[in-house]
Amino acid sequence: SKKIARLQLWTEINNLVDLQKGVSLCLLSAEAGDVSVQLGLGINPDHIIGVDIDKHAVAAAQYKFPDVNCTNTDVEKIADKYSSKLSAVHLDFCACMTRELLNKVANISDMIPDPGVISCAFLAAREQGYLRDEIMGASNKHCNTSFGARATVLAHQLALGSKHSKILIPHKFFYYT
């Protein structure tokens, strides 16, 4: 079901912004699933940048997709480098939501010119400390699901951490188990 969610996500992003006109940035992993889906949608490999801090993941992704720019660095550094060309960024962290990752999302969102899209994915139910309390509070006050509570916390962090004067609250969510 992750492959279906990934396809839905990139199809929606491509409907919002033309991925052939800008650059899309995604986190890699050795499987490079987001790269695979974009190529399957017909996106030119010159318009895709994959990044990972794990050099082995980058090497595996580059081997699978030699025409795609796969880079071993922090995603914020590469987002800053290509900021004027970014049309979409997808951050599938494969980690639970943390304040550090939320700040990273907010920082990168400031680098994307309008119109642009940022999306992100987190593992659920492993948050700790203050952020866990914040999610539980959002769940009790604003939402009837933990999924909605995480979205509320993310939207709140973007509103606080972003320099943009206008923040669009997510309107679609794709989730899988």
Image: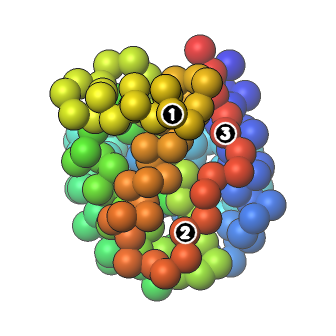
**Given contact means CB atoms under 8 Å apart, are the residues at marks 2 and 3 in contact?**
no
Name the disc covering residue 141, or none: 1
Q: Nearer the viewer, mark 2 or mark 1?
A: 1
Left or right of 99 on screen, residue 155: right
Q: Assess whether mark 1 and mark 2 are in contact (beta carbons under 8 angstroms).
A: no
Any mark on residue 167, and which?
2
Instruction: Give above or below for 107 relative to 2.
Output: below
Tag 2: amino acid: Ile
- Three-letter amino acid code at disc 1? Lys
**Which residue is pictured at 61% across the width and 24% down the height?**
144
Which amino acid type corresponds to the residue marked 3 in the rendered image? Answer: Phe
Q: Find the distance from the CA under tag 3 to the CA under tag 1.
A: 20 Å
Element type where label 2 sits in the image = loop
**Label 3–label 1 contact, CB within 8 A:** no
Q: Residue at x 72, y 28 (%)?
A: 4
Residue at the image position 26 percent from the left and 67 percent from the top: 77
User: Which quadrant of the figure has residue 125?
Assistant: top left
Q: Left or right: where does residue 81 sit relative to residue 4?
A: left
Q: Which residue matches tag 3?
A: 173
> Mark 2 vs mark 3: which is more N-terminal?
2
